[in-house]
Structure formats: structure tokens, C-alpha cells
Image: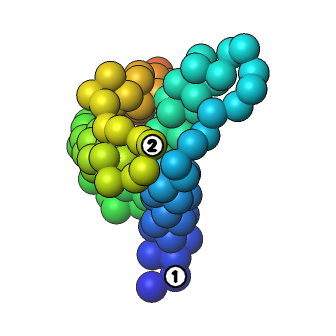
Amino acid sequence: MNKFFKYWTPIIFWMIVIFALSSIPNLKTNLEEDYILRKVAHAVEFAILTFLFIRALKQEKISFAKILIFSVIFAIFYALTDEYHQTFVLNRHGALKDVAIDSIGILIMGLVWYIKNKGRLIKN
């Protein structure tokens, strides 16, 4: 049970944060770079989610490849549900291009983790 709280509670918390941010009708700022900042934020929030999935799955004693694949799939699935959720929020809309931007963050995190840990893959 302690393992659950240590590794899976942060994922649930972060998913709630993403959900809450997606529930805000208008996240625009008055900055000139607003569009770029929002898109970078999308990629970063899903990179963090992917990291948290990787961290949790490492504790489940599954293969290196499965950790990476499941983490990417779970994060992309949540990105899809997040965009669908936004279709119900006033002044927001769901867009597949945002899922693509989220996926960039997801894939970058997956790639960073792969590069950092590929030595372990070769040893196994």
C-alpha cells in the first residue's frame, strides 16, 4: 500500500492538475508570446506525466520496453481525454493538434529516459 502512495498518488495528483487547468475557460495572457507559452506548457505538463508513469512502472518489475511503451501510451491516452474534456468547457475546444503537441513532450521524455537507461538494456 505504501508503494501505491509513493508512486501512483503523484500521477493521480498530476492528472487532477491537468484536468483543473483544462477546466479554466480562458488561460490567455497579455504576453506577446502567449500562444507559444501555452503550447510549451502543454508539452511540459505531459512530459511530467510521462516521467511520473515511468517512475511508477519501474517499481512494477516489468521490462524496460514495456515501461517505455506503457508510459507513452498512458500519457497519450490522457492527452486525448484531456482534449475531449475541453470540448465541454466554455471558451475551450479540443484539438488534435494539441494532442500532437502533448505527444512531443511525451516522446521527448520517453527518449530522454531511453537514452539515459539504454546501457541497462544492453546489459540485460
> Which residue, as the protein is rendered here, is positioned at the far front?
91
Q: Is residue 102 above or below residue 2?
A: above
- Disc 2 marks which amino acid? Asn
Residue at (51%, 33%) from the top-left corner? 42
Q: Is residue 83 left or right of residue 3?
A: left
Name the residue at the bottom extreme. 1
Label placed on residue 91:
2
For residue 96, side relative to residue 101 (left or right): left
Residue at left offset 63%, top offset 33%: 28
Q: Is residue 15 above or below residue 6?
A: above
**Which residue sits at x=32%, y=38%?**
94
Residue 93: image x %, image y %? 35, 38
Most foreground residue, 43 or 68:
43
Quick check: can you spot residue 53?
Answer: no
Q: Is residue 51 above or below residue 108?
A: below
Camera-side residue of 40 and 65: 40
Q: Secondary structure at mark 1?
A: helix
Residue highlighted by disc 1: 2
* Along the line of sight, the residue nearer the viewer: 70 or 118: 70
Q: How many marks?
A: 2
Amino acid type at mark 1:
Asn
Crowding at mark 1 (Cα within 10 Å: few <14, some 14-19, many 20+):
few
Dot 2 falls on a residue whose secondary structure is loop
Q: Work out whether 40 lies above or below 84.
A: above
